[in-house]
Amino acid sequence: MVRRVDPDSRRFRDIVRGKIRENLKSYISRGELIARQGKDSVSVPLPQIDIPNFRFGKPEQGGVGQGPGEEGTPLGGEEAEAGPEAGDQPGEHVLEVDVSLEELAEILGDQLELPNIEPKGTESVHTIKERYTGIDKQGPESLRHFKRTFKEALKRQIQSGVYDPKNPVIVPMRDDRRYRSWKTQSVPQSNAVILYMMDVSGSMGSEQKEIVRIESFWLDTWLKSQYENIETRYIIHDAAAKLVDAHTFFNVRESGGTKISSAYKLAKEVIEQDFPPSEWNIYPFHFSDGDNWGGDDTTLCMNLLNEHLMPWSNIFCYGQVKSAYGSGQFIKDLREHFPEDERMILSEINSRDEILQSLKTFLGKGK
Amino acid sequence: MFENRALTPRLEELRQEIRGHAVEYGLDFFEVIYELVDYDEMNMIASYGGFPVRYPHWRFGMQFEELQKSYSYGLSKIYELVINNDPCYAYLMRSNPEVDQKLVMAHVYGHSDFFKHNEWFSHTNRKMVDEMANHAVRVRRHIDDHGLERVENFIDVCLSLENLIDPHAPYFGERARTSEESLEQARLAATGTKFEAKPYMEEFVNPPAVLAEEKERRLRDLDREERFPPKPERDILTFLIHHAPMRRWQRDILEIVRDEAYYFAPQGMTKIMNEGWASYWHSKIMTTRALDATEVIDYADHHSGTLGTRPGVLNPYKVGIELFRDIEERWNTGRFGPEYDACDDYSRRRNWNRDLGLGREKIFEVRKIYNDITFIDEFLTPEFCQESNLFTYKFDRQSGNYVIDSREFRQIKDKLLDSLSNLGRPVIVVEDGNFKNRGDLLLEHEYRGVPLKLDYARATLENLQRIWSRGVHLRTQVDGKKKLLSYNGSRHEEKVLT
């Protein structure tokens, strides 16, 4: 049923979307949205949406209050917000709006002009089933739900005092009628797995990790909007690789050398074990500062990529985060080995401001 | 969502009962139509300021989302919603228990009585529900003609200025302007005041230098009369409607925004009194008549919830009801007038009782002729401040906290009156509509110690400029310096005035 407020709510949401679009770059580089992530939505702080007017500035003047306390007793926390008004005005606060991840992905897609992904293989067909599970106020008479209609009419008559228990005649009106309605259920058939790999050797600092974290949040958001069923795996590595959960992935700090091949080897095992490439769209993302331990290991990496990872994956993305210690050699090696292959996507991320560009590089191919 | 908003038979019974009590107590109200709504309908109506028929605008959607969210997190719940209209409309939450419904009904009869009799509401439109619906039709028509985007942007601009009204303007008629002709005559007739004198004393009784000076002064006053506006104008919206270059539909929208701002202004001016009065009556009716013994605990719980205080925030319900009770008590016992005021014997004052019994009569009179400012000014007493634990607070830079500043009566009263004046908003007037002799608009912020929020002020100037179309300027004080903020349509300037 359409409520009177719906058009205005929709209009407000449009404006919110517009604002987010305008400020997407700063939202991305500040990374503040990640901490505000709920289950399906993100709470976005919107500073500039209210209508400006002439009003008093800092409420340093104070005001009048009520309650016990000596002179000089501090008032509790949130009252600090109250303005010089007597307290019936809302305190100043930044408006926060819940935006669903889907919407956020849509905004990201619009802004970066990302093409929709065409899942590989033939498995991407959805199975759609119709089930009569709902009740609606409109519908064909053939689908009329007699019991529900009767109940509505009964409720109405009792409420308005027309109902007489001695003579229980129930006459349904137009508004009382209820009909069976169907919902379409689609069974997901397109599966994808994201494999995040990150170098956690001593040369990756906290700023570098923060960049990876922000980048992965947006990659997740986008890919989730593209596939019905998505799995994520996290691999960290220094000289050896480990499969970890998301929390560890972003917070662990190791030291020691770097053997990239260890991560690739583990990725290969994970795929072989859980995600047969014929049924899964596979997205490995590898972030590192580009330092690898010796040429031998690099050769090993290239072999692994060539023979296993590359043929299996939709795209293979390597993001090189600039760090003070890394040599940045690895990206050059990759470029050399895969000059023509468009499944190999390379991006150098020197600072947070470049995250947006790097997202476009990674996702811009539509694969 | 239910479409049936009529009261259930049981609630209708209660309504008649409560209404009977209210009438017996002498309340005289606009008839109240109660509607039964769900929480989301309640939130919806509340987000439209009580009028479900208002024009479309995104901010209503925003308010709705905020209300929905805070309701679903259990942070807030709207108990009562009542519209100043004849008949009054009030909304009851379907899910409330009976005792709450009774409380709200009694409360609403108090509001309705206040709307009908308080002098400050005497100029409000009593058919505002219809009027709002008309506004909505007008706005919709403009949207059809000019497109949603353009109309909405313009409404945003107008809303940004909606505070710039003179809340007292409705109580005196339009200011008469002196006509050009009479001005010219006055100018010709302007002379100094001559006193009768013997010819040989003439030079001493009426010294020519003094006469010339006086004439000069009169002419200057007349010049001022010719300025635009003749006197600093507080009703800036009306000034803009009359003098700013706008398309007809834009003028129409600005008029709508102004009408609504004036309609809501008295509610801001009488917040403490209005809520105090309604709370006084719900408490009176419930505790002396309507309350069933089984409901006492729930009633007490909800009543104390309404009157709850947090440090730093003055609850208008609480201050209002207590002041009304205090007045009733004082007029019942005769604690007023010169004799009482002059008495400085503490124990005599405490036990003062003349058995006048004028209390009820007095509070009815008070609800008729006062507004929050005059109410506080007249009836806030040192004893009251002390008994109800009032204090002033200030910002303490060292601790970064608000701390209790003083419990001094004078200071509390001053601060309270300060915060109530002009509805707690800065006073801003049109000083000159032909500033710099090039049609610019000069506003003056009447500075009283609290500076403006500058980023907002600049954004507001931008909106003002869109209506005025020439440059706009605002004189104010920033960090103790007089400054002129200007916006000419493309960039902001800031100048220190000496």
Image (cartoon, coloured by chain):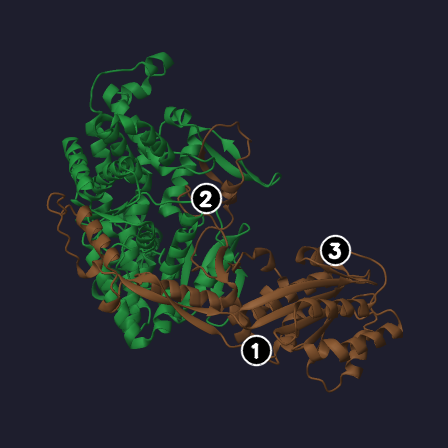
Chain colours: A brown, B green
Residue at x 72% of width, y 61% of height: A209
Give the secondary structure at mark 2: loop
Q: Amino acid at mark 3?
A: Val
Circle nearer the viewer, 3 or 1: 1
Q: Where is residue B15, by image quadrant?
A: top left
The answer to whether tags 2 and 1 share a subunit is yes
Question: Which of the chains bears the disc numbered 3?
Answer: A
Note whether A69 is above or below A146 in the view shown. Answer: above
The residue to which callout 2 is attached is: A84
Left-right relation of B163 to A35:
left
A279 and B256: which one is in front?
A: A279
Q: Amino acid at mark 1?
A: Ile
Question: Which of the chains bears the disc numbered 1?
Answer: A
The residue to which callout 3 is attached is: A252
Note whether A304 is above or below A138 in the view shown. Answer: below
The residue to which callout 1 is attached is: A117
Circle nearer the viewer, 3 or 2: 3
Q: Where is residue A234, by image quadrant?
A: bottom right
Residue at x 36% of width, y 73% of height: B150
A52 and A251: which one is in front?
A: A251
- Per the model, the C-alpha gap separating discs 3 and 1 is 32 Å
The answer to whether tags 3 and 1 share a subunit is yes
Q: Amino acid at mark 2?
A: Pro
Residue B357 spot, x, y in % from top left: 20, 21
Left-right relation of B323 to A247:
left
Give the secondary structure at mark 3: loop
Give the secondary structure at mark 1: loop
Circle nearer the viewer, 2 or 1: 1
Question: Which of the chains bears the disc numbered 2?
Answer: A
Residue at x 45% of width, y 46% of height: B448
